[in-house]
Image (cartoon, rainbow, N blue to C red):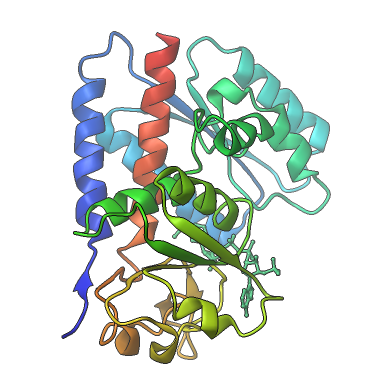
Amino acid sequence: MAAQWIDGREIAKAIRLGVKKEIETLARKPALAVVMVGENPASKVYVRNKIKACEEVGITSIECTMPTESTEERLLETIRDLNASSTIDGILVQLPLPAHINAKAVLEAIDPNKDVDGFHIFNTGKLFTTGEGFKPCTPAGIIELLKATDMTIAGQHAVILGRSNIVGKPMAMLLLQENATVTITHSQTKNLADFTRQADILVAAIGRAKFVTADMVKPGAVVIDVGMNRDENGKLCGDVDTEAVKEVAGWITPVPGGVGPMTIAMLMVNTLTSAKTRQ
Ligand code: NAP
């Protein structure tokens, strides 16, 4: 039997609606500053989608677009101003930054209480210890997708492909918090399929088009496809060979329409949380 789809668009829509309703009860609309340096076409699309979502839920978005040649000091000044502003609840710096800017220094300059992307080391530390603080949006959205299936996360074996700071590692922490047993794999993992075939929950976040094939998946598993790649025809595709894997998996996310919309929905949730705390 073919897998059931986990419809990220619908789940994200319901989350955004909840955020919108809550914002209507606040004395002041939350405000999110979106900082972008340079002209990266993919970044422009992501920023546009985030601003559109802000408009929909009632978050004021402040676009801070800076030219590619902007210095790191100029960017840090902008962040300091946004940190100091009493009306800004969230600050997001769209990555990647131009090569001459130290992205780590920039992310660490954001006030952790306005770090709605959850990338500041302070929030990372909280994630790895108390489980509090802003959670990175993509893995937080994946937890919501998993909760939308009929599977109980606790006790399941979750296998994650990829160990990046924005997806793989925080994903592992969030799944641990949900009492899954977690295995993280990466490019140096030997016999990768031996691990993936044991997964009740398989999260693919490696950036390799259609890498996960049907023979790598345990029958009935929940397969979450984080990848955003182009296939040989230039068509958007994930890290999972969806057509083949959906014949084996129990649940699967589409690309597009799976993880992507959830990342933005969780950004809205984090911005609302910040505004509520600050008000
Ligand atoms: P990344 O920083 O490039 O990390 C990729 C990870 O995959 C690394 O840990 C790497 O291992 C591992 N890897 C690469 N090739 C592998 C292989 N053949 N076997 C096993 N592991 C392998 O990527 P990322 O930022 O996490 O993003 C991953 C994908 O998700 C990309 O396609 C990205 O566009 C997408 N993404 C989507 C969203 C969304 O909202 N939909 C959000 C974020 C990212 P090493 O550490 O050993 O190098």
Residue 175 image offset from top left, x and y in percent: 44, 51
Up the image or down, 257 lies above or below 210; here it is above
Q: Residue at x 58, y 64 (%)?
A: 184
Q: Is residue 272 left or right of residue 24?
A: right
- Which image quarter: residue 180? bottom left
Up the image or down, 75 lies above or below 41; here it is above
Up the image or down, 192 lies above or below 26; here it is below
Residue 9 image offset from top left, x and y in percent: 25, 56
Outermost left residue: 1
- Which image quarter: residue 76? top right
Count of numbered marks: 0
- Which image quarter: residue 164? bottom right
**Image quarter of the C terminus:** top left
Q: Is residue 181 left or right of residue 222?
A: right
Q: Residue at x 50, y 59 (%)?
A: 182
Q: Residue at x 63, y 51 (%)?
A: 165
Residue 102 image offset from top left, x and y in percent: 80, 44
Q: Nearer the viewer, residue 155 or 34?
A: 155
Q: Is residue 27 left or right of residue 32?
A: left
Residue 115 image offset from top left, x and y in percent: 56, 30
**Image quarter of the N terminus:** bottom left
Q: Residue at x 28, y 28 (%)?
A: 58
Q: Nearer the viewer, residue 124 or 242?
A: 124
Up the image or down, 44 lies above or below 161; here it is above
Q: Ligand 1 is found in which quarter of the picture?
A: bottom right
